[in-house]
Structure formats: C-alpha cells, structure tokens
Image (cartoon, coloured by chain):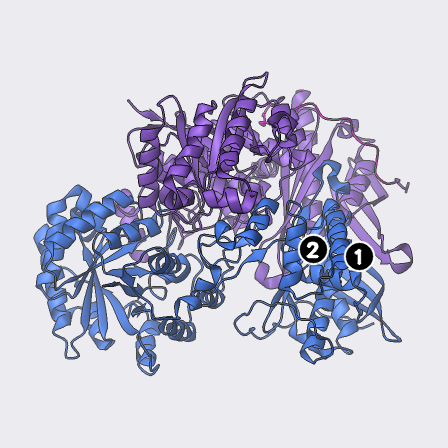
Chain colours: A purple, B blue
C-alpha cells in the first residue's frame, strides 16, 4: 500500500523571509486558495506575533471555505523563565484559532546556551511547557513541533538533540519535524539521522522534514528523509525563502509522484496544476520566473540543440526525463518557438470559448507574438478572453478610446506632494465624453477620469474597483527605456479579474490594462443580463467591503 | 591520502546550449582564462564541427599560455558505415590539436536503434573505431569518452550499456564519463550504477560523472557518483545549460572542498575566487545573477529575520553552514521590518558609519517609521547610507530640486504610442538649470532631463547609468490610490547601487529614487577624490561596457 506523504507549505511564512518578498493580506489569501486547489494538506499562513497583518490573515482565512487544506499558525516556544500562559507569542498562537499550530524549539545545545542563554534543562522545559499549553487550548489544535537546527545539533550532541524531540513528543506533539535550518546538511547525514529518530519515536508520532538549499541539496535531503521514514514534507512553492531558499515543493512533489511508486500525495489530476501554481506564486510575489527551474520552468522542456530536437521528434521520451504534461508544463522547441498549443487549447476549453481549429491557430500565433513582446496572460485571463473574442470577430467594444493625457507636477513649495491630472476622451455610441480628474497617482487619475466618462452610460461600473496593480520591467538591460508590463486586478461583488498592458511607457501599459478591466466588467454584465451567451469563469471571493469614498476630488469638465 | 578529483568545465560547450546564451570568441577566451585561474583542470571549449567560431577558439586558446588547465575539444563518434578517417567530425577534432579530446557515444540501446538507426553491434564499432582513431592522432591526445544517457541505458539494458563503455575503454579511452543526459536520475540510482561500473573497469581507466538538473538533483547525483568512485566531475559555472542546466560546478566544488575531508581539488587559496568567477560568467553571458544561488549568490548569506540576525551576531557559525569568506562571498544583513535594532547596527558597521548611540537610536526610529510607510532598504542600501548621513547632519546635497513635471499624451491617431516629456528645474550652487527631455517612459524622460541639468556641473555623471527599476504596490487595498515603492538600480564602471522612493504617485516615487541615485554617485566621487572620508562598500564588477547612445532624442530648453 502506498505511504501517505503530508505536504506542508510554508511559502507564506518561511518563504516570505526571502529577500524582496512581501505578501499583502490579499496576496496571502489568493495564494492560500491556490494551494488548497493544488491539494496541499497544511498551509502555514504566518507568524501571528510578528505583525498585525498575519493575525488578520488568520481571521480572514477562516472565511475561505477551503476544500482540503488546514491552516497552521507558526510561533516559538515560550520565553525563558515564564509560564506559557503569560507568553504573548503562545497566546497569539492560540488566539489564531487555527486547526494546526506549529511551534519551533531549539535542538542544538549551542543554541540553547549561547543564543537563548538558558540551561539545557530549561530549554527542555520550554519545549515541553509550550507544546502542552498549546495542546490544551480549547480548540484542540493539531500540533507540529519544528526541531530547529536538528541536523547540526544531532552532529554535535546527538543525545541532547534526541532529548529535545522526546520532550515535544511526550508533551503531546502530533508531528516532529527535523529542520536543516542552515541548509548545509548532506543527504547521507539526513538519511542516518532520520532513520535514527524514526526508530526512537513512537509510531503514533508523525515525522517530518524541513530543508533549506544552502548546499544546493535541499531536494535530495528531503527525498533522503522520506526514504528513511519521514511522512511530512515542509517547503515552499518555487523554493522561495531566506538566503538560498527553502526546498522547492514543486520539485519534491514531482519527484515523489513521478519517480517513485510507493507514495500517496496529491489527489488524481492535481499534479498537472503544478506549473500553473508555480507561475501564480511568482506573479503574486512580483518575481521573475526562473527559466531553468526543474519541472515547472519555462525552459525545463525547451530543446535547443538540433540533435536533441531531432531526437525528441523521433522518440519523445528519449530526451525528456518525464512527460511535461504530467506537471502541466510543455515541450518547447526553441528554433521554431512552437510553444503554447496545449495551454491555449486548455485555456479556451476552460472559458468555454469557441475552439474551431482556424481560431485556435490564430490565437496561438497571436499569443506567441505577444509573449515574445512581454505579455503574460497567467494573471490576466480577462485580457486573454478579450483577445480571443477580438480574434474571433465577436468583440463588441462598449466605448472607443480617442485620447488620454496624464500630467504630474511636483513642486518644492508643495513639499513635492505632486499634483496628478488625467484627461480622457472616449466615444460611447455617438456621444464623445471628455473628462478630467485628479488622482493620487497616474493610474488613479486615469481610472477616475475614465469612470466619470463611462458611469453615466453604464451605471453598473460603480460596482467595480481596482484592487491591485503590479509593474514589472521585462528587459531590464535596457534600463529606463525597457519594456514594462502592468497587471491590474479588479473586482466587483462576486469576482476578481486580471488584465494586462505592455509598453515601453508604464503609463501607457497601465492605460491598456485599465481599458481591458472596464471592458471585462461590461462584457460580464452583458452576459448576466442575457445579451451574450458565452461564460467566463470567475473566482468567487468573500463579499466586497464597502467602496471607499473617492480619494481625491473629481473635477468636472 | 586525499583522493584527487579532476574538474572538467563545459560552460563554453554544453553551457552554451542554455536558452539565450551565446558566447563570442572573445567571451570564450576571457572565460577560459578565468577558469584557468580558478584551477579548473580541463576546459571543454567547443565543438569544432559545429561552427567556425569554435575552430577559431582552439587556435586562439593555444596562445593563451594557461597556467594549469588543459583544453578539450568535443565531438561525436563517427557516422554509421564509414571509416573514421573519412568522418568530418572526427577530423575536425584531430585538427583542433587540443591536449584533450572528448567524444560522445550512445549507451542506451533505444538510442542506437531508434535515433541513430544502427544495429547494436555497429554502435559498438562506431565507439571503438572513433576512440582508436583519435588516440592514434599524431599529437596523442588524452581521451575522454562521454557515455550519453548512461543511466537511462543502464536501467533499460545494463549489459549493453556496460558493453559500450568497455568498447571505449578497450580502444584506449583514458576516461569514461557517465552522463545523465536527461537529468532525471535519482541519487540512489547513480550511486549503484557508478559503483557497478567502477568495479567493472580496469583501475587504469578514470571514471567521471556528468549530470543535469532536470530533477533538481544534479549536485546530489554528482556527489553520489564521487562517493562511489568517480574521479572526474563535469559541469558548468552557475549550472548554465540546456533545459534546467548542467550541474553547477560552484556548488560541487564548494561541497567537495568544504563538506568532506578526503578530496583534493583546487590549489590552496583558489576556493575564495569562486564567487568572483561565478559573477564574471554571469556578466559575460549577459545574465542576471541568481540571488539565492547556493554558496555564491548575493543572498546566500543574507540575514533578514530579527531572530536570526541576533543569533548571527552572537555565534556567527550558528546560522551559517559555512563561513562565506571561504568561497569569496560575504555576509549581508538586510534592513527589514522583521529585524530591527541588531540589523541596523550591523549595517552601520558594515558601511563604517559613525555609530554613536544617539545617532543609532535616531536611525532606528526613522527606519522603522519609513518601513511602516512602505520603504524597504534591502535593495536600496545607497538610500540607506544617504539617510544616515542626513540624520547625522553631514549630508551635503550637490543640487537642490525645485520642480519636475511629466506629461504623457496618448492619441488614437498615433496608435496610442504615447509621447512623454519631462521638465526638471534644479539649482546647482547659485545656478538654476531648467531642462526638458523626451523619453520612452516617464522614468527615462526624467533621467534624461536631470542628466542634462547636472552633467555640465558634474561630468562624472556620464559614467553612470540606470540598469533596472522595479515598481511594487504596497497597500493594495487602497487600489489605484495605493502607495507605490520604486527601486532603481544604477551602476558605473566599478559598482552597482540601489535607491528607493515611496509615494502614492509612482512618478514621484521614481523621482525620489532617481535623485538618490545621482546623489550617491556624486558622494562616491567626492570620497574617491578625498573630499570626504567615510567609505561605502561597493560590489566589484567586471568593467562596464561602453554606454549605449541615448535611447531618445534630447530636446534643448
């Protein structure tokens, strides 16, 4: 019988320790939903003591109605010399009311005495007290004990390292997770230590592994642990995290699912979502994809050498270690840029768009062209749907853009708080609307002016608002003359949608994405009122908070 | 006695198969020299048959006067049904006149019959003939036989896979290198196969390993091979290469040198050049650094979490798997919201900034305030240094900003290709400069206008240029009225620096970051010319390529 492996994702907690990574509350909720859809078992959402955003996350996550995953809150053992009930960190952990709590403690004697400055006995008491206190909470959480620096500790003082995990296990921990916190362990060391711990722990206590990639061995270390008895794997999507990152769960999942027989992890059909989830996390974290990333990277199945491409054509499996479709990725033949076909077909099916072969071919060509210029439709599916409708000749624009103009003026006398003004000229039917609005920035001013022009014609636009925009430089080498990609996320009472614009000018890219956002909302309303029959998928979200009052005065034309 | 490990670098041949990688002849010669200085034993410089550039390289490489490395030329076994002396590929290999030749042949029966379309016996003859022909060349080259797809072949038909390498060994190959061409092998498979081959081969024949990273296990596979008897390691600097890349020699070298006792590889003192060589290859290959790269990445020893920073200061080794200086890298303490006091102190020490307690407290307060408003100094240390100088009352601005103005106009007639114009009014000493410039976007236009105003006063600014800018929305909840963070990266001939701006207006945030970038360059020049004594650390870089012509016409006031 296959051995069940529990997947524990810490993208939102340990992953957010990575340089330049910062998730908003909204980002965290979006990622949580995607991880749940992928089939992750446990999602570590944050460290409630560390900042108010995390505490708010745990409240909001309870409303998410997850299908499969359970949320974990992370914290540390109690401080020295106090009762757990008086420890603010432990209290914050209890107050998060998550089904799972994870508490980290010291396994390495040196860390107890030199960093915490406590006796070895007090460290054991801190572990036992904290675990017992959390297990006794009214909502009876499942408890994961993370044994920090376990492998270093085990090398220096194996007896003491084992005593720390026994302290946690005896106090009621459901899981003991061995952490290679510094990321420098070797696979053979991990294998030996995990086997020893597994033999020492009662079978009722689960064993897990948490590795970092400082030695470029995180995946191998995780596999070595699983082969020697670990049943839980902790990691992050794309291996984001401090220094060299945590182990990349994408690689771990793909290896365990495809290279071995005996493991039960994702539900059937879920593995093919892996590439999509990886790219989604990059988008949300505003990071560039890593082309050569194993399994899910855009180059992972890209063939360049003529010999190889020839071979792939003859015997596909002979030049690829797995079939790329298994992980939702695809083969790319670089000479002819043949990418995308199955993705496009899949996407059109998903949106129930007409998929006759001629249209498919046209969409494929256009998307490939646009991707070469820097478009990316992963987080901008509303723009993709509009594009298909345009190519199919079915797009009915609700308004026509004649011109826009943005001026930003910063002056010293005003403390450089700049004044931004946007004018928009659009045609709705036969009426030309020419509006002007101020804003806190160019996108805000353009949004206000466009709204002012369109709301008299389409009152339903009052339901919609922009919730996020992201700007990414595509070809950094060209510096300030580089091409820029803007992705705007909008929502109304029941859906959230992304649109995209690409230009050398970030104002122009923003304008393109704004126009698509408005057109998407109007098309959606047409379908709702039965004007059009096609349907677009929308991700359902918690009810929309009341729309805030306009941030800046609107100036009439 | 330590076992000698031969390092075989194929950055210039297999590495150049990576997507977007293209080395000029000059690039190849520069990299060759650096690899030699690092202490690489064998440098595979190219595939003489594949293009004239490679043939030219081998001629030029003979003039390089290398201290240590030997150059290898790469080719394939003869084509089917002909005599080796009539095979153009083998003749090109001989004509390269390199001290080492490497020839690749098929180990997997499927590849012989399905891809080459030859009988299994003919494949063996092709291997034996080719090796014997090359060994008989007048210059008597050392011969490396690369057994392509060895691990796949060995899994499917171990007897035949072994026969192919015996054919090469009996014909006179000095080395048999087992290749995981598809990159999908697991460490336990590699360990078993290498041990079996080592037992089967005479001791006079060397055994090597060549892995790819498709399963995210290339380093582990290489280490497993070395532990089981391989004495030669093939790989590339930074793991560049087709699909997910070859094994990263930086990780392999660092692991073998620092994590094990029994191996003899680089000469004393050379390991500390590893980071420099890694960055040099990125520069030459025109690739961005990978921040989280093991051992040599800029984030590999970067500490963000407050708890960790506190720990690092107490017991440096306790939060780092190795001392970063051993590989020529350095510890970095990131200034971030999670860290606080110990981070700031560390950073001020690093920049040798005055650290009296009153200033420290002031800096800490200010940074915390700014971070709450969305500043992040991790990638903007130049702005951090300017901030400390301002708080210390020592900042001497080189110019005073009076006003700026940006206008973007998009019109339908022009296909919405917008026109961007920026005006800048600054005061330098008693002179007011008022300039205007067009640009491809607002940042480009502001940069051009500011340059035009300042270069007449500070000609040294011509050395500097912007290389990247990043825009991030901080509090998305407020939608387009959200606060925006802009980070700009600039460089001159010997350094790279980041600056930051935060505002509700992305143009204003860009302006702030631009002004800091210019002020940093001017302060740096003052220190260089001895006007000021404080020092800022700069990351050393390869010489700056000639500055490209301005991307857009500059319009005179």
Q: Is residue B36 visible?
A: yes
Circle 1: element type: strand
Q: Is residue A342 visible?
A: no
Residue B255 image offset from top left, x and y in percent: 36, 56
Residue A309 image offset from top left, x and y in percent: 32, 52
Mark 2 nearby-residue class (10 Å; few <14, some 14–19, many ≥20): some
Image: A193 above or below B241: above
Instruction: Name the quadrant containing residue B272.
Output: bottom left
Confirm whether the magenta stretch covers residue A531.
yes
Q: Chain of mark 2?
A: B
Between A69 and B26, the one lying in front of the other is A69
Residue B527 image offset from top left, x and y in percent: 69, 75
Image: B475 above or below B132: above
Instruction: Name the quadrant containing residue A388.
Output: top right
Left or right: B464, with B165 as reference point? right
Disc 1 designates what residue? B407
Residue A280 image offset from top left, x and y in percent: 54, 39
Instruction: Name the quadrant containing residue A335.
Output: bottom left
Give the residue displayed 74% in from the left and 26% down from the top: A545
Which label belongs to residue A234?
Answer: none
Confirm whether the magenta stretch covers residue A540.
yes
Between B144 and B359, the one lying in front of the other is B359
Disc 2 designates what residue? B417
Q: Which span is picked out in magenta?
A: A530-552
| Quadrant including the N terminus of chain A | top left
Circle 2: element type: loop
């Amino acid at each position: 019988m296959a051995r069940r492996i529990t997947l524990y994702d810490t993208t939102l907690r340990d992953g957010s320790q990575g340089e330049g990574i910062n998730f908003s509350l909204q980002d965290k909720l979006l990622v949580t939903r995607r991880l749940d859809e992928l089939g992750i078992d446990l999602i570590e959402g944050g460290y409630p003591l560390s900042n108010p955003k995390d505490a708010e996350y745990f409240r909001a996550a309870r409303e998410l109605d997850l299908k499969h995953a359970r949320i974990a809150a992370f914290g540390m053992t109690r401080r020295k010399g106090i009762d757990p009930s008086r420890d603010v960190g432990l209290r914050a952990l209890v107050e998060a009311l998550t089904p799972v709590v994870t508490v980290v403690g010291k396994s390495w004697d040196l860390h107890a005495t030199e960093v915490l400055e406590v006796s070895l006995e007090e460290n054991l008491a801190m572990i036992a007290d904290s675990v017992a206190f959390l297990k006794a909470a009214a909502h009876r959480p499942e408890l994961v004990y993370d044994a920090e620096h376990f492998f270093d500790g085990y090398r220096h003082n194996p007896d003491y390292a084992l005593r720390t995990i026994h302290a946690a296990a005896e106090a009621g921990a459901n899981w003991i997770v061995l952490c290679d916190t510094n990321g420098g362990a070797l696979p053979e060391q991990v294998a030996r230590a995990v086997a020893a711990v597994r033999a020492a722990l009662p079978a009722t206590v689960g064993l897990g592994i948490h590795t970092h990639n400082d030695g470029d061995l995180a995946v191998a270390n995780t596999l070595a642990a699983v082969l020697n008895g670990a049943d839980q794997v902790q990691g992050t999507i794309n291996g984001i995290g401090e220094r060299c990152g945590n182990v990349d769960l994408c690689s771990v999942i793909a290896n365990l699912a495809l290279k071995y027989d005996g493991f039960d992890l994702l539900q059937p059909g879920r593995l093919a979502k892996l590439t999509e989830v990886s790219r989604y996390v990059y988008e949300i974290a505003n990071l560039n994809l890593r082309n050569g990333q194993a399994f899910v990277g855009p180059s992972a199945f890209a063939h360049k050498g003529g010999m190889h491409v020839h071979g792939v054509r003859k015997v596909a499996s002979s030049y690829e270690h797995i079939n790329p479709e298994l992980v939702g990725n695809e083969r790319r033949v670089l000479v002819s840029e043949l990418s995308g076909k199955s993705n496009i077909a899949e996407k059109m099916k998903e949106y129930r768009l007409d998929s006759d072969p001629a249209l498919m071919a046209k969409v494929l060509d256009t998307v490939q062209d646009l991707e070469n210029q820097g478009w990316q439709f992963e987080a901008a599916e509303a723009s993709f749907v509009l594009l298909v409708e345009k190519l199919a000749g079915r797009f009915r624009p609700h308004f026509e853009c004649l011109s826009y103009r943005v001026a930003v003026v910063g002056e010293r006398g005003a403390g450089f708080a700049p004044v931004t003004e946007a004018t928009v000229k659009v045609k709705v039917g036969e009426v030309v609307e020419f509006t002007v609005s101020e804003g806190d920035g160019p996108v805000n001013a353009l949004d206000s002016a466009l709204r002012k022009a369109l709301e008299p014609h389409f009152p339903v636009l009052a339901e919609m608002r922009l919730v996020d925009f992201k700007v990414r430089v595509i070809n950094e080498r060209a510096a300030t003359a580089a091409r820029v990609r803007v992705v705007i996320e909008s929502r109304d009472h029941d859906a959230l949608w992304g649109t995209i614009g690409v230009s050398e000018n970030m104002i122009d890219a923003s304008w393109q994405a704004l126009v698509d956002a408005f057109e998407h909302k109007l098309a959606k309303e047409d379908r709702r009122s039965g004007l059009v029959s096609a349907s677009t998928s929308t991700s359902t979200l918690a009810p929309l908070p009341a729309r805030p009052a306009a941030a800046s005065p609107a100036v009439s034309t």
